[in-house]
Amino acid sequence: MIVGLFTGASSMVSQGDYQAVIARNLANVNTAGYKKNVAVFQSYMSGSNEEGQTNTANGTGSSLGKISTDFSQGMLEYTGNDLDISIKGDGFFSVQARDGSTLYTRKGQFVLSRDMKIVTPDGWSLMGNGGEIQVPQNAKSVTIKGNGSILADGKEIGKIRIVKVSKLSTLESVGGCAYRLSDNAQPPEDSADSEIANRYLEKSNVNAVDEMVNMIANMRGFQVGHKVTDSIDETLKKLIQLAT
């Protein structure tokens, strides 16, 4: 009976963790370049030891094992801004954070910094094949072509670096729709055939309707776990009363 109580309680804990995942997805449904999180649950089963006694040392019930990322492409939305770009198909933009580390993102929303570099709204530099992309101080227009070439007043000044990660599970989220490679991950390869959509932003790949359905189902699961623990709790109270 105590095992059943633990099972119901662990179910409520895992459903609560899943609720946080759903809430994060819904909060970013309109965030450009956001990739939805997917909860992966794991179950625990009690076993018996050599004496035939039930062993619950490893726990029973279920828990939220890990949170994976769905990197499928979102819809492209026209913005008309010259520095809004999207990657058609696989690949990531390479950006340099303020601490010098290299990050990867699908969020192609860029602006010009005061020193005329193409950066993210967080101030991270967009990397080209030759490093940071420097726009001439007197440039009047910046155009990005489909092959990634960047033109300032019609003159090419660089080309955007797009990389492909062979194993997406090695990407770790650092927030802001950006990711870094895990320590033992294989370095990404430069993509030579990627196509860029200029003046388009890739929308979040979160489907609000699906997430709302998941939320309702998750709440139902939480209620079931709550009823289980309440029922066992009442039974234990009655047993204690009978024993005293």
Image (tube, rainbow, N blue to C red):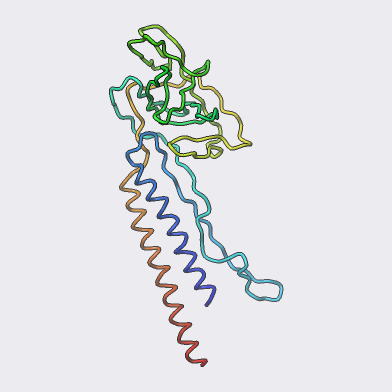
Residue at 29 percent across and 26 percent down: it is: 78
Q: Is residue 17 left or right of residue 84?
A: right
Q: Nearer the viewer, residue 110 or 90?
A: 110
Residue that sits furthest to the right in the current view? 50
Q: Position of residue 63 (x, y in %)?
A: 51, 59
Quadrant in the rendering for residue 112 = top left
Q: Position of residue 184 (x, y in %)?
A: 63, 36
Q: How many discs appear? A: 0
Q: Position of residue 110 (x, y in %)?
A: 38, 25
Quadrant in the rendering for residue 35 = top left
Q: Position of residue 27 (x, y in %)?
A: 35, 45
Quadrant in the rendering for residue 70 = top left
Residue that sits furthest to the front in the current view? 114
- Whether 50 is drawn above or below 86: the answer is below
Residue at 49 percent across and 92 percent down: it is: 242
- Whether 178 is drawn above or below 223: the answer is above
